């Protein structure tokens, strides 16, 4: 991954990438990213990754139905998150749906958009750990192509307003 970032060059604008999943803390990442974007004059890219399991050809019709349902759920989640971002900061985020391994898809989205300058994740407050995406990315943190901001899941709107 050697794509040169161009977010602050003429004709470009910085964007942050935020992962939209079904966790309770995902709203904290959306909130932070939206506030960051409006204060910086940047944009937000919202990514939903659908993990598609291996499909058995015998059950191809069922797999296609499951994929269609997963895309419908992804669009619903992105609609909700984009509505939240628009309500907070009057911005219309870009929306991306990908299929596959979350870490690989996150890296690919970053690689393909030279204006993405930061990844925003939110950490779970549960005893099971910070969450699967943060845990998965921790092993490659030293070689990650952009800064990663981890928003504690327990921060209130007012707390995030003071930080962003």
Image (cartoon, rainbow, N blue to C red):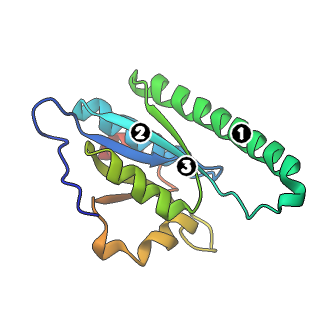
Give the x, y percent position of residue 80.
Answer: 61, 31
Residue drawn at x 66%, y 57% as measured from the top left: 51
Q: Secondary structure at mark 3?
A: helix
141 vs 83: above or below? below
Residue drawn at x 83%, y 43% as measured from the top left: 65
Give the x, y percent position of residue 30.
Answer: 47, 41
Quarter that holds the N terminus: bottom left
Q: Secondary structure at mark 1?
A: helix
The residue singled out by tag 3 in the image is: 26
Residue 131 in sight here: no
- Can you tell which mark lies on residue 9? none
- Can you tell which mark lies on residue 73? 1
Of pointers 1 and 3, the one earlier in the residue sequence: 3
- 115 sits left or right of 58 in the view: left
Q: Residues within 10 Å of mark 1 (few under 14, many from 20)?
A: some
Of pointers 2 and 1, the one earlier in the residue sequence: 2
The residue singled out by tag 2 in the image is: 45
Q: Secondary structure at mark 2?
A: strand
Closer mark to the observer between disc 1 and disc 3: 1
């Amino acid at each position: 991954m050697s794509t040169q970032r161009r977010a602050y060059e003429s004709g470009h604008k910085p964007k942050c990438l935020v992962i939209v999943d079904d966790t309770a803390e995902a709203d904290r990442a959306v909130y932070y990213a939206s506030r960051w974007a409006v204060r910086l004059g940047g944009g937000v890219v919202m990514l939903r990754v659908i993990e598609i399991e291996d499909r058995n050809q015998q059950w191809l019709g069922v797999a296609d139905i499951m994929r269609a349902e997963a895309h419908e759920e992804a669009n619903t989640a992105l609609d909700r998150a984009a509505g939240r971002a628009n309500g907070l900061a009057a911005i219309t985020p870009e929306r991306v749906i990908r299929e596959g391994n979350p870490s690989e898809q996150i890296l690919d989205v970053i690689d393909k958009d030279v204006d993405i300058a930061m990844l925003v994740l939110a950490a779970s407050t549960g005893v099971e750990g910070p969450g699967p995406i943060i845990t998965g990315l921790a092993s490659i943190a030293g070689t990650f192509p952009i800064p990663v901001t981890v928003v504690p899941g327990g921060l209130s709107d007012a707390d995030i307003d003071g930080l962003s």
